[in-house]
Image (tube, helix red, strand yellow):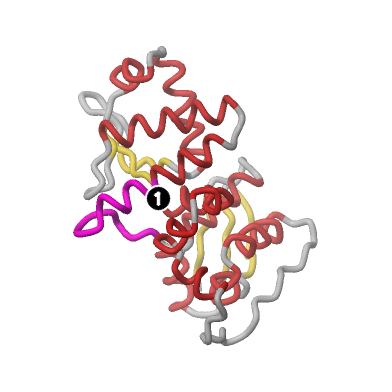
């Protein structure tokens, strides 16, 4: 499942769908997560540039918008980055503020448990393939996606999480990745070919990095070679 950039003819609908997913998910969480999601939604609705995927706003401005101090801003922004929902594109420097992107794919993956509560029309828009599968689609996968083997390792846990999110994507791209080493905060993976490695690096490495960080915060990113 990939979220297309919410620009063009259907931009308004796509934006509302993303915000609806965040809202429904937030309402299902405890008060601390609800507040964090509300703060993110405030940033999105007031200052996020959807077309360029840029959120450029100083900590003092954010503190004013959120009615908090800058220490709270630093703490909450760090939580959003740890979730993989915010991605730092340019660090703050003298005379300029940090620029963040918003990982819409990751947000939609994390909010998926609440899609059904929003309604079948929502699911039909954001994941039409799920509707087809639920009504007996005649599209047959090349092979069934077997569940990863649980051996207690970091990579096995990460594979299990990815498989739960996207079984077809796991079977096509993640299952064949093997661990080279874990060191200095990086999980190094080997792909069976250069093409495979390029695809994973382009389309999946950020999702994998988020999953791995959530399991083991000491491992900050995933790198793939082939």
- Segment colored magenta: 3-18
The part of the image, by quadrant, that contains residue 4 is bottom left
Question: Whole-percent x and y of residue 40?
Answer: 41, 33
**114 relative to 1, above or below:** above
Report the label total. Answer: 1
**34 relative to 117, above or below:** above
The residue that appears at 54% across and 57% down in the rendered structure is: 208
Question: Whole-percent x and y of residue 189?
Answer: 58, 65
The part of the image, by quadrant, that contains residue 42 is top left
The part of the image, by quadrant, that contains residue 2 is bottom left
Asked if the magenta segment contains residue 14, the reply would be yes
Secondary-structure class at tag 1: helix
The residue that appears at 34% across and 44% down in the rendered structure is: 101
| Residue 62 vs residue 37, the one in the foreground | 37
In the image, is 72 to the left or to the right of 29?
Answer: left
| Residue 151 vs residue 105, the one in the foreground | 105
In the image, is 42 to the left or to the right of 213?
Answer: left
Asked if the magenta segment contains residue 86, the reply would be no
**67 relative to 200, above or below:** above
Question: Whole-percent x and y of residue 80?
Answer: 47, 35
Q: Residues within 10 Å of mark 1 (few under 14, many from 20)?
A: some
Q: Which residue is mark 1?
A: 104
| Residue 5 vs residue 186, the one in the foreground | 5
Question: Whole-percent x and y of residue 7?
Answer: 23, 55
The residue that appears at 56% across and 84% down in the rendered structure is: 141
**17 relative to 55, above or below:** below
In the image, is 2 to the left or to the right of 59?
Answer: right
């Amino acid at each position: 499942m990939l979220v297309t950039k919410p620009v063009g003819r259907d931009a308004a609908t796509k934006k509302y769908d993303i915000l609806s997913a965040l809202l429904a998910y937030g309402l299902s969480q405890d008060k601390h997560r609800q507040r964090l999601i509300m703060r993110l939604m405030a940033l999105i609705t007031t200052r996020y540039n959807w077309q360029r995927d840029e959120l450029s706003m100083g900590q003092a401005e954010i503190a004013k918008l959120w009615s908090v101090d800058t220490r709270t801003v630093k703490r909450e922004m760090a939580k959003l980055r740890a979730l993989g929902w915010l991605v730092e594109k340019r660090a703050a420097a003298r005379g300029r503020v940090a620029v963040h992107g918003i990982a819409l794919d990751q947000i939609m993956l994390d909010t998926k448990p609440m899609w059904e509560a929003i309604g079948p029309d929502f699911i039909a828009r954001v994941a039409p393939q799920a509707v087809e599968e639920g009504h007996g689609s005649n599209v047959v996968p090349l092979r069934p996606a077997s569940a990863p083997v649980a051996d207690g390792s970091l990579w096995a846990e990460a594979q299990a999480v990815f498989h739960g999110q996207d079984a077809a994507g796991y079977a096509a791209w993640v299952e064949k990745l093997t661990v080279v080493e874990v060191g200095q905060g990086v999980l190094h993976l080997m792909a069976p070919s250069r093409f495979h490695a390029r695809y994973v690096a382009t389309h999946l490495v950020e999702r994998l990095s988020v999953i791995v960080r959530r399991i083991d915060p000491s491992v900050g990113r995933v790198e793939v070679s082939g």
